[in-house]
Image (spheres, rainbow, N blue to C red):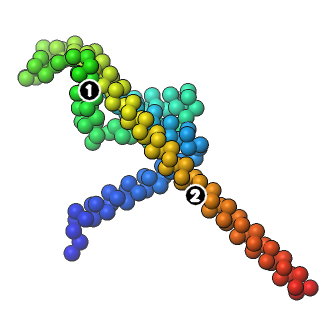
Amino acid sequence: MINSAQTGKNRLNSTFSRAYERFVKIRGHPREVALGLALGLFIAMSPFMGLHTAIALCLAALFKWNKISAAVGVWLSNPLTAPVIYSATWFVGTKITGTTLAENLPHTFSFKASLQLLLKTPAILETLTIGGIIVGIPVAIVAYYIAFGVIKKYQEGVREKLKERKARRKKKKKNRKKKKKKQK
């Protein structure tokens, strides 16, 4: 009998393996690909969900970094990870800005309560943005160095395999020429 938890784990590992394979195969200079990913992860820490991809693509194009890896980076922020990301950025942002909204949040839903919350939106966005910048910088830096190393190693491996393949073809061609000379 197959354990359903084990099957789920295998699927998750398979999904991550495929994502990793696709990421390292992104074409471009390792520096540009890594910078694109770092940018995408930095943008993913911002409170502007829904605009992350557009922002990352525009900035990646402006800086001439890899747009595909920037889009991949913003996918870190999704409905599953957003509560964790926004909790972290909110926590860090409140330590910097001193914003406290918990005791002022309405406990019942009403038009007046909704209006009060809407009036606090600029402070909420400011806190999340500042927290996102502070959390995003180290995330982007670490991601850059990891991605750069992984992509560079992968591309060097591909170049080495191509050199070996070319050398084998050259050797085969040389052997064929020798056989033809012996036959004459």
In terms of secondary structure, where does tag 2 sit?
Answer: helix
Q: Residue at x 47, y 55 (%)?
A: 21
Q: Residue 165 shows which numbered tag?
A: none
Q: Which residue is mark 1?
A: 92
Mark 2 surroundings: few (<14), some (14-19) or many (≥20) residues within 10 A = few
Q: Residue furthest left?
A: 108
Q: Residue at x 78, y 72 (%)?
A: 173
**In the picture, which quadrant includes the C terminus?**
bottom right
Q: Position of residue 83 (x, y in %)?
A: 24, 36
Quarter occupied by residue 179:
bottom right
Q: As shown in the figure, which amino acid type bears the numbered disc 1?
A: Val
In the displayed structure, does residue 38 sit left or right of residue 92?
right
Q: Position of residue 65 (x, y in %)?
A: 55, 34
* N-terminal-most mark, 2 or 1: 1
Using the image as rendered, state which of residue 138 and residue 38 is in the foreground.
Answer: 138
Q: Residue 157 shows which numbered tag?
A: 2
Q: Is residue 25 above or below residue 179?
A: above
Q: Is residue 161 above or below residue 51?
A: below
Q: Are marks 2 and 1 in contact (CB under 8 Å)?
A: no
